[in-house]
Image (spheres, rainbow, N blue to C red):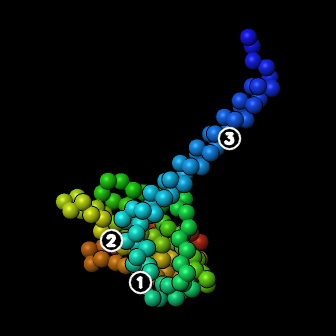
Amino acid sequence: MPASISSLQQMAIFMTIVTGGSCSMMYYLMQKNFARSDYYRLAMDQLRTHESAMGSLGAPPLQAHSIRLTDRHNRVDKVSAKIKIPVSGTKSSGYLYTSSTKDTFLNKWCLQEAVLHLHNGQRIAVFETEKAEPGDMDFENPSTGASF
């Protein structure tokens, strides 16, 4: 027995809702996994303890927003992670660019560099290791396109 057009329409609407909900749930879970990761938490902890950066943001309260999963600055593999975390306070907002490596022997992430780039163009080095080489952070300034 052939299905009626109205039942096919209802099925299409139902499948659209289920697919949209599934995609939304997957995106939410991926964001949650980023926020739970050691390389993310290490960078945010360094930002929270850096008085100058917190003052420039007007924090506390410090807001960390969702990471754009399609941004080319967000690269994570088994031994390295470079992420761009959108942050804001009451006075300003910007991005925390971070670079971390994983010590495979200890199975532990180590923050290599964290730089806060505010939307007004101010750049604050939140954390740098002695081992960091110039050019390790190959991020672009969003307002000028210049690499830093």
Residue for point 53% across, 48% down: 26
Residue for badge 2: 112
SS state under label 1: helix
Front residue of 52/36: it is: 36
Image position, residue 112 (x, y; %)? 33, 71
Tell me which amino acid carries mark 3.
Answer: Ile
Label 3: few (<14), some or many (≥20) within 10 Å? few
Tell me which amino acid carries mark 1.
Answer: Thr
Residue for badge 1: 49
Residue 139 is left or right of residue 121, and the answer is left
Q: CA distance from mark 2 to mark 1?
A: 16 Å
Label 1 or label 3, whichever lies nearer to me, is 3
Tell me which amino acid carries mark 2.
Answer: Gln
SS state under label 2: strand
SS state under label 3: helix
Residue 67 is left or right of residue 133, and the answer is right
Front residue of 42/134: it is: 42
Image position, residue 31 (x, y; %)? 50, 58
Where the C terminus falls, by quadrant?
Answer: bottom left
Residue for point 48% across, 84% down: 53
Is residue 125 visible in the rendered image? The answer is: no
